[in-house]
Amino acid sequence: MTERPLSPHWQVYKFKYTLTTSFLNRITGVVLSLGLIVLAYWLMAVASGGRAYTQALAVLSMLIFKLLYAALLVSFCYHLVAGIRHLIWDTGRYMERAQSKRSAAIISVVSVLLMAVCLYFAFFAGAHAP
Amino acid sequence: MSLRSPLGRVLGLGSAKEGVHHWWVQRLTSVALVPLAVWFLVSLLSLPALDHTTVIVWMAQSWTSLLLILFVLIATWHSQLGLRVVVEDYVHGGAKTVVLVLVTFAHALIAVAGVFAILKVAFGGSP
């Protein structure tokens, strides 16, 4: 394999809000990808009939899965809000330094509020998260 | 002395001219996922319970099946595009190809399993 130039490894960069928001978008995206495995498993369980579904639901109700649902909800809220910020950037708007700092603050606040709402409805309001 | 011509070597190392397509599809799928993913989450959390009967009745409704299939397909597509970039950035050498192949296969499996399951329920195949 030919030695190709690499971009500097992420560890060399200084902590910055722009980098952090971008990196969090990646991490939450990877977490959501894991969620797709659970989604496919759940859908297949639904399609496999009542008995198989009950068994699958017992697995999906384990504590580790509840933690995963919380992680998925948190990731979804962040990825959604940060993704919309990226889409706005793609139109060429709000790319100045001060603006991107402000939008980083906005998406932090909005996504945290959204997380609180989602977690409340998933685990407390109806409390029917499996 | 390699059998590859200088031109071939240069072409082999250069851009494959697929970057714009990747970028564009990632944006298209993300725009589509904003309403689809929100719909999925709200619908799921609005279900009175998650027992088999409730889920089946919900999933077998035509609009639910249709939107669910769209959601599964576009979400796996978006996920595949995103994970591909992550793998390309952090995995190097021979492992990169192996991981990329596995990631692609996994996404294909998830997409097909999801669509198959939704259709089976929609056509009444899951009593």
Image (spheres, coloured by chain):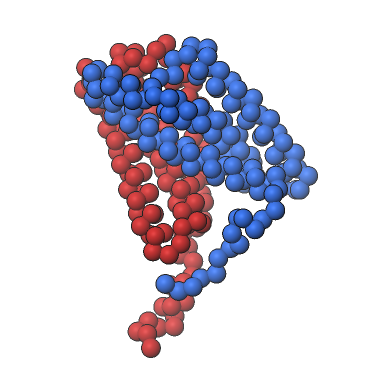
Chain colours: A blue, B red
Please give the name of the residue rendered at 42% of the width and 38% of the height, measured from the top-left corner: A34
Give the image location of residue B77, x and y in percent: 41, 43
Q: Nearer the viewer, residue A40 or B23?
A: A40
Q: Nearer the viewer, residue B39 or A64?
A: A64
Residue occupying the far front of the picture: A63
Q: Nearer the viewer, residue B81 or A56?
A: A56
A52 in relation to A106, above or below: above
A73 in relation to A5, above or below: above
Say which quadrant the N terminus of chain B sits in: bottom left
Res. A92 in view: no
Left or right placement of residue B85 versus residue B103 in this view: right
Give the image location of residue A112, x and y in percent: 63, 28
Q: For the image shown, how many numbered marks are present on the structure? A: 0
Say which quadrant the C terminus of chain B sits in: top left
Please give the name of the residue rendered at 54% of the width and 22% of the height, measured from the top-left corner: A119
Please give the name of the residue rendered at 51% of the width and 31% of the height, measured from the top-left corner: A71
Residue occupying the far bottom of the picture: B1
Left or right placement of residue B43 versus residue A57 in this view: right
Q: Write down the quadrant of residue B71 in the picture.
A: top left
Please give the name of the residue rendered at 38% of the width and 54% of the height, measured from the top-left corner: B99
Left or right placement of residue B62 versus residue A29 in this view: left
Res. A106 in view: yes
Give the image location of residue B123, x and y in percent: 24, 23
B100 in relation to A125, above or below: below
Give the image location of residue A6, x and y in percent: 55, 65
